[in-house]
Amino acid sequence: MRILLTGGTGYLGQAVQRALIFQGCDLTVLARYRRGLMPESHFEPGDIRHVELDPLLARTDAVVHLVGIIEENPQTGQTFDVMHYEVTQRLVEAMVRHGVKRLIHMSALGTRASAQSRYHRSKWKAEQFIHGMDVESIILRPSLLFGGGAPFFVMIKNQCRLPVVPIPGDGKALFQPVARKDVAELIAKLVTVDQYWGQTWEIGGPKRFSLNGLYRHVATTMGRHYLPLIHVPLGLMFSAARFGENLPKFPVSVDQLTMLNEPNVTDDTQWHQVIPEPSPLARDF
């Protein structure tokens, strides 16, 4: 099967490359840079916002679309609406032109029309556009990913080295971390079967953690069994984040604060049909 993979050199994308190659797929990776490309993958250089998609899709059986950002950079045109909605729109329109029916689309747990974060609202817009087009899709909404140097968990590890760790709000929001390798294996298996098309699956790991609990779990794996936490009032954090939006490399955005303080869990276990024993959060972050 000939697969076009977008976002394939990113954190999740590299694991998806390996899984698709293991499944025997003929894989083309559309990316700006070769860094993160597997030797068995075909490289197609280009920025998905501008590259001509028609020649790629003329020789493609299915698309795995992983492109996404967690932080905006308006100076370079990388906003949530552009990278999540507009990019998906031009990709799916090109698929329709060439009769490419199958799309696995990476969304995010928490995506909904009424979401407070612009990140989740832009993901919702992309999902709704896909539903209105003549393609068969499987939409995946994972919780936090871990394994192989997950950016979120690398940040937590770095913060756990501080004498006292600041936590935005009360730290009670729940998360359901899921292994990167499990999500990659899920994608590789789904793309090659005839079942499940037209469905949306929420994906959570086998255990729920509060934000406080995530920090304490990571600290324990580092040999730190007592972790002093200081809970910073959300009003103060949001004020700082709004001010920081005008500063380069400010550590947290308004959108990220919003998502850190709302539940990110699911009771959906449909994906266990394909991955029956999801990996627990352990030491491999």
Image: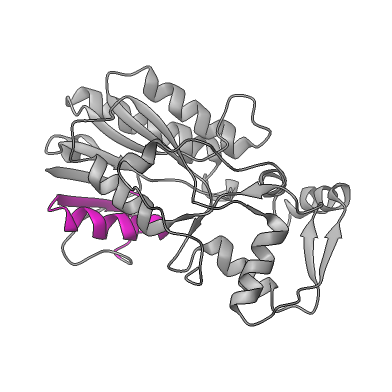
- 13 to the left or right of 117: left
Residue 128 visible here: yes
The residue positioned 18% from the left and 37% from the top of the image is: 193
The residue positioned 32% from the left and 40% from the top of the image is: 273
Q: Residue 212's x, y, as percent?
A: 72, 59
The residue positioned 81% from the left and 48% from the top of the image is: 238
Question: In the rendered structure, does residue 197 fall within the stretch colored magenta?
Answer: no
Q: Residue 256's x, y, as percent?
A: 66, 49
- From the viewer's perspective, is residue 260 above or below residue 110? below
Question: In the rendered structure, does residue 33 fall within the stretch colored magenta?
Answer: yes
Residue extending furthest toward the front: 277
| Closest to the observer, 61 or 186 | 186
Q: Residue 145's x, y, as percent?
A: 49, 55
- From the viewer's perspective, is residue 246 above or below residue 200? below
The magenta-colored residue range is 6-34
Numbered-mark total: 0
Quadrant the N terminus occupies = top left
- 256 to the left or right of 98: right
Q: Residue 52's x, y, as percent?
A: 25, 39
- 59 to the left or right of 127: left
| Closest to the observer, 119 or 195 | 195
- 167 to the left or right of 41: right
| Closest to the observer, 174 or 22 | 174
Q: Where on the picture, by quarter, is residue 51? A: top left
Residue extending furthest toward the bottom: 223
Q: Where on the picture, by quarter, is residue 136? A: top left
The residue positioned 75% from the left and 50% from the top of the image is: 172
| Closest to the observer, 178 or 93 | 178
